[in-house]
Image (spheres, rainbow, N blue to C red):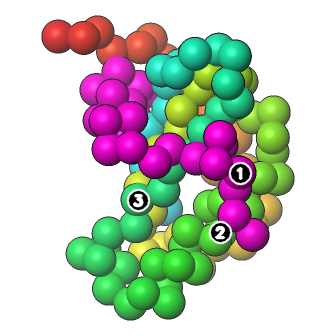
Amino acid sequence: MRLPRERRLRRQEDFGKLRTLGARIDCGSFVLNAGLVASESQPARLGIIAAKKHIPLAVQRNRAKRLVREAFRACPNLFPNGWDVAVVVRKSILTRSIPSLIEALSLGATKAKTQRPRSDG
């Protein structure tokens, strides 16, 4: 099941803005880039990066993306409105369960909310 269009990061410039302005948190099986980048009236948006370099088989890449989407869906209030979240998955995510991913995502969200945002320059 797909996330609604308004809940997805789709444009390359959104990913780039998040990479430069958002907090970067290493969560073991994935790297979380999150920050208050969009307008606060829209819901939190999710983008997933699953590179062939790290996960060579398409079946495994798609499974990793499904796991992240399910963990994001399970905690709708984890990220407040206006936040953008990009998750860069690593191969070790394939061995984790949904509850452990939810726990890691919530820990990463807590760290991202307490981190000071990066400056433009």
Q: Nearer the viewer, mark 1 or mark 3?
A: 1
Q: Disc 1 or 2, which lies upstream in sequence?
A: 1
Residue type at mark 1: give it. Answer: Pro
Do residues under tags 3 and 2 come within 8 Å of each other at their CB atoms?
no
**Frontmost residue, 38 versus 85:** 38
Is residue 100 something that shows in the picture? no
**Residue under the image location 29 percent in, 77 percent down:** 52
Q: Quadrant where the N terminus lies?
A: bottom right
Can you name the residue that lies furthest to the front here? 5
**Frontmost residue, 46 versus 33:** 46
Residue type at mark 2: give it. Answer: Leu
Q: Nearer the viewer, mark 1 or mark 2?
A: 1
- For disc 2, the neighbor class at 10 Å (few under 14, some 14 to 19, many from 20) is some
Q: Which residue is mark 2?
A: 67
Relative image position of residue 88 (x, y in whole percent)? 41, 55
SS for tag 2? helix
Q: Disc 1 or 3, which lies upstream in sequence?
A: 1
- Which of the labelled discs sits on residue 58, or is there none? none
Vertical position of residue 113 compared to residue 64: above or below:
above
Q: Which residue is mark 3?
A: 49
Residue type at mark 3: give it. Answer: Ile
Q: Which residues are magenta?
A: 1-27
- Which of the labelled discs sits on residue 4, or is there none? 1
